Amino acid sequence: MGITASYKRITPQKFAEIQNDIEAAASFFELDLDDLDFSNPQAMIAKLQERRSNKHYFRLEDWHALHFLLTGESNLDDTQTSPPLCNVVMGGTPTQFEAGYRFVRYLTLEEVRDVADALSQTSVEELKRRFNSTVFNAAEIYPNPSPGGWDEEEIETLFELYPKLVRFFQNAAKEGDIVLLSSD
């Protein structure tokens, strides 16, 4: 299993409350194992599906591919693209809360609105025009699927999920939520 980008909408008030409560902050991204009943697999699956269908939560496995399509950058540590599109995957201000990879970051209300507007102006068709499997494979876009690397079939899942991510940010902007981002 690879690194997944997790997005969680949260009110500014709730974010202020959890600033000093690491356990509460972790609950926004991690499903507490104590909440799972391992003796009842159907209940576990139901709980996981409920979390996946939650409009305040979004997961993305092809995060590096999306970042590359939106910004043209493969280097994740030294982004040269200005906001808001670089904020979709690698942006935000780091918090003190650790994630699986680096720290949980947050986007302010203004940053969420800017991301929502920018994503709304970038269609799936535009992303499809930007996709080039040869360029993707040469840039070693994570997770570099095998065998054969990136192709139209491998990228299709991202194209299917993209409208949901756009709606996620649009709803966050409309309802005045900030967004927490983590890589786990």
Image: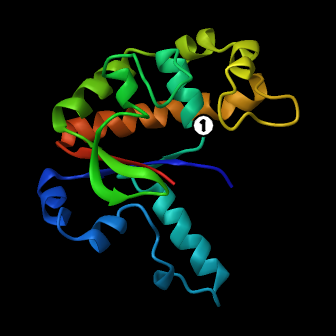
Going by the picture, which residue comes out furthest to the bottom? 39
Q: Quadrant of residue 86?
A: top left
In front of the other: 42 or 132 = 132
In-image side of 132 versus 98 (left or right): right
Q: How is the image coloured?
A: rainbow
Residue 76 x, y percent position in the rendering: 50, 30
Residue sitting at x 28%, y 69%: 22
Q: Horizontal and vertical percent for residue 60?
A: 53, 43
Extreme residue in the front direction = 78
Q: Is residue 83 above or below residue 5?
A: above
Q: Kindly identify the amino acid type of the residue bearing the numbered disc 1.
A: Asp
Closer-to-camera residue (155/44): 155
Q: What number of labels is visible?
A: 1
Taking the spot 11% from the left edge, 57% from the top edge, the residue there is 13
Lateral position of residue 80 relative to residue 171, left or right: right
- The residue to which callout 1 is attached is 62
- Helix, strand or loop under label 1: loop
Q: Nearer the viewer, residue 69 or 36?
A: 69
Q: Is residue 124 left or right of residue 169?
A: right
- Around disc 1, counting alpha carbons within 10 Å, would you say few (fewer than 14), some (14 to 19), or many (20 or more)? many
Residue 141 position within the rendered picture, expressed as x and y whole percent measured from the top left: 65, 28
Q: Is residue 3 above or below residue 117?
A: below
**Could you say which quadrant of the image residue 44 lies in?**
bottom right
Question: What percent of the width, then of the height, locates residue 160?
Answer: 60, 32
159, above or below 34, in the image:
above
State which quarter of the image contains the N terminus: bottom right
Q: Residue at x 78, y 23 (%)?
A: 151
